Amino acid sequence: MKCLVLGGGGFIGKHLCEGLLERGYQVRVLDRPHLDLDDARALASRVDWLEGDFTNAVDVAAALEGCRWVFHLVSTTLPKNSNENPLYDLESNVASTLRLLDLAREGGRKIIFLSSGGTVYGLPRTTPIPESHPTEPLCAYGIGKLAIEKYLELYRMLHGLDYAVVRLSNPYGEYQRTQGAQGVIPIFLHKALHHEPIEIWGDGSVIRDYVYIGDVVEALTRVMTHAGPERVINVGSGIGTSLNELLQILRDVTGQAIDCRYVAGRRFDVPASVLDISRARSALGWSPRVPLEEGIRRVFRHRLGQSPA
């Protein structure tokens, strides 16, 4: 049966498409045109690739045709800039998703929505953070993700729409962009390899939960066939790593003396965000397999032009 990956040309999307193909699924992608990227062009030859706009209902309706599972990976904003224009975040992400749900509610489809374990919870009252933790996001990005989660449950109650929400921590891996605003590991690696200084917001004590992309894909493919009552599931490593600890791992892996510069912290950065992945273990039988240092070594080898182990 066919899967639709909305945003399949992005970092997570490309890895997910590869994972679905390896597991024998047919795959369709809806994404904006950006086939100038070599890895996206190679993937497009193996899937049903549609160029279009997630905010356009006609494009989305065409993409949905014949698909049993829908992976919703699209986001038009980032936590960093979402507060600058909350209305745009609402219109492009939440409203567009509502149009998707209206189109998808017939035909026995299942929506797998990629939410944000790093923003929907807000300031942690306890760590690691379970799915039952209060949701008090500090940015429009997190508010939008949470709103979509609520609408998914509403559509389940009103229309019987099947869905699952994956609250993801900080994924990293091969093919992740080094010039974007997200993805601290590939960005730091790129700077280390080019002997460029690394900027750290705050004193480097901020703690995050980094999970390797291969483990993320395994979790997502298990979620699609999960039939239990759990609908919101954290996916992360369950281990916290500070930026200073991350820098030391990068020094060990690369053998580089990394130049680090500390600048003023950002207001929306919570001090620590580590997800409790007990539910993923019990409901999906899933646990991350790739430790952080090994995952970074894989990305490092990939950056050097070698095949990851």
Image (spheres, rainbow, N blue to C red):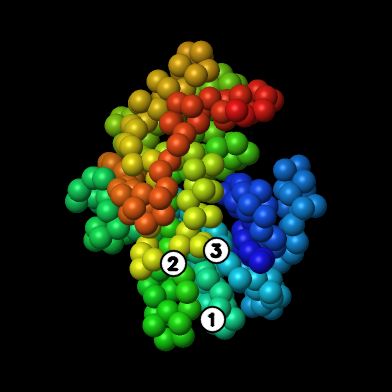
Q: Nearer the viewer, mark 1 or mark 3?
A: 1
Q: Secondary structure at mark 1?
A: loop
Q: Nearer the viewer, mark 2 or mark 3?
A: 2
Q: Marks 2 and 3, Cα distance to the nearest angstrom?
A: 19 Å
What type is the residue that disc 1 sits on?
Answer: Arg
What type is the residue that disc 3 sits on?
Answer: His
> Of the numbered discs in the image, which one, if any, rests on residue 227?
2
Q: Indicate left or right for 80 with 58 as reference.
A: left
Q: Which residue is mark 3?
A: 72
Which residue is pictured at 26% across the width and 45% down the height? 128
What type is the residue that disc 2 sits on?
Answer: Ala
Q: Marks 1 and 3, Cα distance to the nearest angstrom?
A: 14 Å
Depth order, front residue of 176/95? 176
Q: Indicate left or right for 232 with 102 as reference.
A: left
> Of the numbered discs in the image, which one, if any, rests on residue 105?
1
> Of callouts 1 and 3, which one flags the residue occurring earlier in the amino acid sequence?
3
Q: Is residue 65 above or below residue 207?
A: below
Q: Secondary structure at mark 2?
A: loop
Which residue is pictured at 33% across the width and 41% down the height? 238
Provide residue 30's location: percent of width, then percent of height.
68, 63
Provide residue 115's location: percent of width, then percent of height.
44, 59
Provide residue 169's location: percent of width, then percent of height.
41, 47
Outermost left residue: 125
CB under 8 Å between callouts 2 and 1? no
Q: Is residue 241 above or below residue 234?
A: above
Depth order, front residue of 230/292? 230
